[in-house]
Image: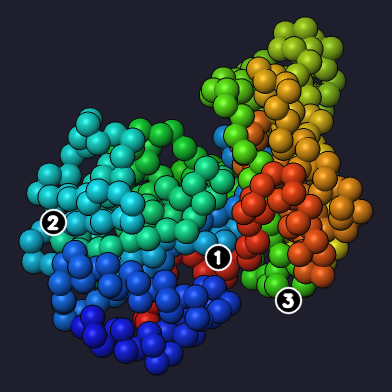
Amino acid sequence: MSLQEIRLSVKSGGYDKDFELLYRSTNTARFRYLKAVDEFEKLYGDFDSINFFSAPGRTEVGGNHTDHQHGRVLAGSVDLDVIAVVAKNNDNIVRIKSEGYDMDIIDLNQLDAIASEEGKAASLIRGMCAFVKQSGFEIGGFNAYTTSNVLKGSGLSSSAAFEVLVGVILSHLFNNGVIDAVEIAKLAQKAENIYFGKPCGLMDQMASSVGGFTAIDFADPKNPVIEKINFDLAAHNHSLCIINTGGNHADLTSDYAAITEEMRAIANFLGEDFLRDINEDEFFAKISVLREECGDRAVIRAMHFLSDNALVVQEKNALLENRFDDFLLMIKKSGNSSYKYLQNVFSASAPKEQGLSLALALTERFLNEKGGYRVHGGGFAGTIQAFVPNDMLEDYKKVIEDAFGEDTCYVLNIRPVGGYALGVK
């Protein structure tokens, strides 16, 4: 469709089924996509074939700091996303202008990593194109305008959403949509690791690409076991809230690194590289010597891993069996383990700043044994997650925003699909 045709289609409801699927509403989505079309036209003019694409942010639901020990996680795609208006070009050049940023221009004749691009969006685009081509798929030039409402710094993985978006565009524009969601996620992780320079795991990309609730087992990280779980959170009259408590201004790199280092120390002492592979009975039999060799905190962080890794299976089964009340209890159990054993709700380097602890305390007091709540993502600062009954939602939002400020409680839903090409039958 041309720009004029796609505008008319959006206005007349031609994309409403897609909008309902992705966002459970149409009016706001219509306005957002029409505005993106206008921005595309300002940049590139008209084309005969215009396409819409979307890739969601993700939330970690179960398994806190388990993936880097080859453990299990439960994640979900959310109804905040990065969208793109896209058209092929004949230049063998990829042009992507993201709202608020300069345009990235990638010549597909040069797909080697460029050191000066490390840490920038251009590296992700170049990396995705390179790895899609290396995997035997076609690539080609296109012009795109993107806009995102995935919250920066919220633990919702805006970078993974962007990588997946590029993968979905390449799949549908040049490969008839045959690059599956799992493959796109793996290529996206490689782009982030090798071209962007961030040694991330695979959870973020996989959750964004696959969509819905997604259980992932990283026992073999090169071939993770993926299970998509069809569960309608909204049908159970609950909403997912991500609460931004503000940031601890200290450098948290050492806090995150210490978790990995201490878990690895326990595994190494027991003759393994990762906690997933240790013998649990041997671990508990050797607590005394492990305390002496690795320290008490390392021991109880390993205990968190063992508990939370097993809990992911229980959470998955509760969703599959529609036992939502049990699922909520497990969310709280996981959060309790992160708080007491993993100890990632505040940084020892800034003990007076305990926004996560305060948000969890306020949430526990307000929900009064209803719903579920836990630290979200890496921890130490940033966000918590809460599953809140809809009849308590408005009052809960007020309690949180009275403490942390306006627009700090984001009300989300788990969307049922991941990377997505709109208008494709």
Q: How is the image coloured?
A: rainbow
Element under disc 1: strand
Task: Mark 1 and mark 3 in contact? Answer it, CB < 8 Å.
Answer: no
Residue 238 shows which numbered tag? none
Kindly report the distance in space between the C-alpha atoms of the residues bearing marks 1 and 2: 31 Å
Element under disc 3: helix
Q: Quadrant of the N terminus?
A: bottom left
Q: Is residue 3 visible?
A: yes
Sequence-first disc among 1 and 3: 1
Task: Check disc 1 and give the amino acid type.
Answer: Asp
Foreground: 209 or 249? Answer: 249
Give x and y (percent) for residue 68.
Answer: 57, 34
236 above or below 61? below
Q: Residue at x 16, y 81 (%)?
A: 48
Q: Which residue is mark 1?
A: 79
Task: Check disc 2 and give the amino acid type.
Answer: Ile
Foreground: 183 or 97? Answer: 97
For residue 231, side relative to residue 89 (left or right): right
Q: Residue at x 86, y 47 (%)?
A: 364
Q: Quadrant of the C terminus?
A: bottom left
Q: Is residue 304 visible?
A: no
Q: Which residue is mark 2?
A: 93
31 above or below 273? below
Sequence-first disc among 1 and 2: 1
Give x and y (percent) for residue 201.
Answer: 49, 40
Quarter of the figure with residue 277:
top right
Query: Circle 1: is it few (<14), some (14-19), or many (20+) Cα within 10 Å?
Result: many
Q: Which residue is mark 3?
A: 235
Element under disc 2: strand
